[in-house]
Amino acid sequence: MTYPHTRLRRARATAWSRALHRETILTPADLIWPVFVTDGEGVEEPIASLPGVSRWSVDLLVERAKEAVELGIPCLALFPNTQPERRSAKGEEALNPDNLMCRAIRAIREACGDSIGLLTDVALDPYTDHGQDGLIDAEGYVLNDDTVEALVGQALNQARAGADIIAPSDMMDGRIEAIRAALEAEGHINVQIMSYAAKYASAFYGPFRDAVGSRGLLKGDKKTYQMDPANTEEALREVELDLAEGADSVMVKPGLPYLDIVRRVKEAFEVPVFAYQVSGEYAMIEAAVAAGAGDRDALVLETLLAFKRAGCSGILTYHAVHAARLLNG
Ligand code: PBG
């Protein structure tokens, strides 16, 4: 049957009909909100390259966590802006049970109980004085196996403080298996692992590095461990390995430019897939809004919907609070 019997515009003619035919639904429960914690009390530090995003001291972060619960956001992703004097070549501060990350976990847990999940980043870049995610040799090459050992210690430190989801973002080989084994051995059987499985060496991470204070420190790039943006099959291998090693869910990062990867991973493995709409993506939307090139609310909701349509179970986004407010009406 062809035109005029078939008219696809019929279903689009009214709001009720569009609602009835809608395939993909976005809700606040799809959102993970990345937040930055800094030292001190009553401290809010705006991040110039991430307009609208601030670092908060633990006391203020607890208030933000309560707001997130009110809005129906199920999970926070925590990132520390480690004090400069606590950064070192080997990033030992990652193992300190009283570091910013652990203090934030305990404080939010005390205030919010189990009403919000806490996802913690495992990688050494917020703690090293060279800005790389792992331990380096004399040439600056990031050493895989030594780094994995440090990451295991970091993951256990976070689990002991009360983290719900351990999220290794370092891209070392074999780290998921090592972390899972250590978590099991210590009885953290219900602590999940969301692996940054397909993480690309991307130009979109700049504002994040400002937020955790690593941009000025970083020499060189991360191309010997993060993936080449040209590759797809390698992403499937990364995901396959991380799942076999014990990851409960996997992440693709960055987000919008990599929706093809999300879709391929979802179709190949049928597991929970998350995407990170990263700092540079957030900054692009805000820059477009500031330039009068688009409407913030519409851009935010459309981009987040696109992640769901591509197959994501959820999205890490700095727009989480704004989006949740819009979705809650
Ligand atoms: C590093 C890490 C990065 C991000 C999350 N974890 C940056 C990097 O790999 O240099 C980026 C997130 C963002 O840009 O929003 N372990």
Image (cartoon, rainbow, N blue to C red):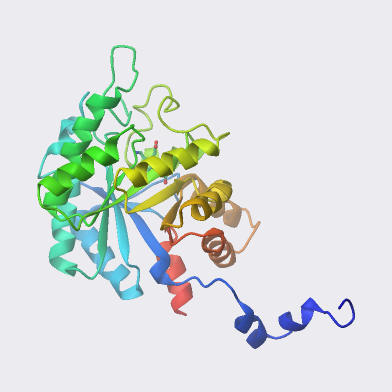
Depth order, front residue of 268/74: 268
**Relative to 74, residue 50 above or below:** above
Q: Residue 246 at x, y = what percent?
A: 29, 47
Q: Is residue 63 left or right of residue 210?
A: left
Q: Is residue 154 visible?
A: yes
Q: In this view, does 170 lie to the left or right of 310?
A: left
Name the residue located 26 percent from the left edge and 40 percent from the top edge. Answer: 177
Of 265 and 254, nearer the camera is 265
Image coordinates of residue 329 in percent, x first then y, are 47, 80
Above or below: residue 201 compared with residue 32 = above
Q: Is residue 128 visible?
A: no
Q: Residue at x 56, y 58 (%)?
A: 310
Q: Quadrant of the N terminus?
A: bottom right
Direction top: furthest residue: 138
Residue located 46% across and 57% down the image:
270
Residue 181 lies left or right of residue 269; in this view the side is: left
Find residue 237 and report its image quarter: top left
Return the residue nearer the eye: 36 or 222: 222
Count of numbered labels shown in the rendering: 0
Where is residue 305, by image quadrant? Answer: bottom right
Residue located at (58% from left, 49% from top): 260
Could you tell me residue 174's position as x and y percent? 30, 34
State which image quarter holds ligand 1: top left
The location of residue 101, given as percent across then percent down, is 20, 48
Query: As rendered, which of 268 and 179 lies closer to the eye?
Result: 268
